Amino acid sequence: MSEHQHPDEISREECADYLERIVYFIDNELDEADCSAVREHLDTCNPCLVKYDLQRTVKSVVARSCSETAPLELRERVLFRLREVQVQITEH
């Protein structure tokens, strides 16, 4: 292994470590020292920042989707269809 590859390997390993912590960082589950370290890394590492932004966006979309309620008409159609399936199952 040449000297030029070694720093890249360390960077990849560091990034992998920070990427694991990003999920906890987004959820505010890190202590202040770890939060500072993650923020500092994100300030200097564009690929990790892009992955962080993606994770944050996905988490936000999922959270928003989970809090929405289906329209009443859709809920009634789904419940009706479930009852139909239950009747078919009990008849067989």
Image: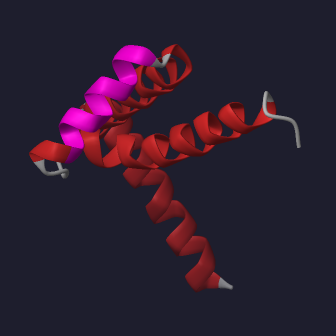
Q: On the rendered structure, is 20 left or right of 47?
A: left
Please say whether residue 39 is one of the residues in the magenta stretch.
yes
- Residue ID at (52%, 42%): 14
Residue 27 in sight in this render:
no
| Depth order, front residue of 11/47 | 11
Residue 43, how many percent across, how many down?
35, 16
Establish if 68 lies above or below 32: above
Q: Quadrant of the C terminus?
A: bottom right
Residue 34, how many percent across, how many down?
23, 45
- Residue ID at (42%, 29%): 58
Residue 42 in sight in this render:
yes
Please say whether residue 71 is one of the residues in the magenta stretch.
no
Q: Which residues are magenta?
A: 34-44
Residue 46, how many percent across, how many down?
50, 14
Q: Residue furthest front?
A: 3
Q: On the rendered structure, is 28 left or right of 43?
A: left
Q: How is the image coloured?
A: secondary structure
Q: On the rendered structure, is 59 left or right of 10?
A: left
